[in-house]
Image (spheres, grey):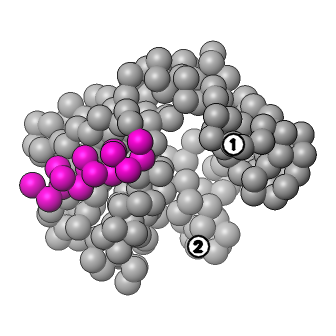
Amino acid sequence: MRIILFGSPGVGKGTQAKILSSQFSIPHISTGDILRSAIDNRTSLGMEAKKIMDKGELVPDNVMIGIIRDTIQEAKCKNGFILDGFPRTIAQAENLDKLLMELHMYEKILVAITANEEEIIRRLTNRRACKVCNQIFVLNEIECADTCPNCGAKESFYQRSDDKEEVIRKRLEVFKNTTEPVLRYYEKNNNVIYINGIGSIEDVTQRILEKINK
C-alpha cells in the first residue's frame, strides 16, 4: 500500500502517519527525516543537498526526488510506504508521478486531512515545547502546566516562534497558495480521499481506515 498524505500545518498529519505506519506495517517517510538521514549518512545526494542548504538555499526538486527514489527502493518499502511532506507543488507532483511510473509503482492512495483554519490556529497556539527535552505538548492535555511530563523539568515550557498566531497564518497562506493546487492536480487523475481532521485522534484514524478499506 502506497499512501501520499496531505494536510496543512497543525492538522494532525504527522500523528496519523505514525498510526497508519503501525497499522499497515509500512514505513512513514517524512521528507525532512530522509533528507537529514541522507546528510548524516553522507550519501552523494545528501552531500549535494548539504552544500545547497549551507548556502541558505532550498533543496531543488531533482535532488529531493533522487533522495525519495533511493528511499522507496529500500527493502523496508517493499510492501509500501506513507509519503509525508512531498509533493508540495505541481512540479513536484509531476516529478513524483514520473518516478513512480519508472519504478512500476502504479497504485497509490491520496489522503488529505482537512480542518478549518481557526481550529488549526487554536491547536497550534496552544502548543508548548520543553526547552530541556524538546518534546511538544498541548497545554490543556498536561496535568501540571509547570512540569514537563517527559523529562520532569520545571518551568521549562515555551512557545516556539512558528506556533505564534501571525506565523501560523502565514504558513497556512503559503500552504493554500502552493499545496492546495497539488490536490486539484491529483483530483484530475486520481481519487483523493478527504478526511475531516476535527475530533479525537482515534476518530480521525477510524475515518481514514474506513475510507481506505472502501
Q: Is residue 32 visible?
A: yes
User: Please, which residue is most extreme toward the front here?
Assistant: 143
In the image, 71: left or right of 139? left
Q: Secondary structure at mark 2?
A: loop
**x and y, in percent, of residue 54 in the image:** 72, 49
Residue under label 1: 142
Relative height, residue 120 to residue 40 (above, below): above
Q: Is residue 62 visible?
A: no
- Which residue is painted at 62% across and 18% down in the image? 165
**x and y, in percent, of residue 132 in the image:** 85, 52
Relative height, residue 157 to residue 173 (above, below): below
132, 147: nearer the viewer: 147
**x and y, in percent, of residue 52 in the image:** 64, 49
Q: Amino acid at mark 1?
A: Ile
For label 1, the crowd category at 10 Å Cα-Cα, with few meaning under 14, some 14 to 19 and many 20 or more, is: few
Relative height, residue 174 to residue 200 (above, below): above
User: Sequence-wise, which precedes: disc 2 or disc 1?
Assistant: 2
Relative height, residue 169 to residue 23 (above, below): above
Image quarter hosting the C terminus = bottom left
- Which residue is painted at 64% across and 74% down in the image? 41
Contact (CB < 8 A) between labels 2 and 1?
Answer: no
Q: Point out the stretch of residues depicted in magenta.
A: 200-214
For label 2, the crowd category at 10 Å Cα-Cα, with few meaning under 14, some 14 to 19 and many 20 or more, is: few
Q: Amino acid at mark 2?
A: Thr
- Which residue is painted at 14% across and 63% down in the image? 106
Residue under label 2: 43
Q: State the separation of the CA atoms marked 2 and 1.
A: 41 Å
- Taking the magenta stretch, the answer to whether it contains residue 150 is no
- Which residue is painted at 58% across and 73% down in the image? 43
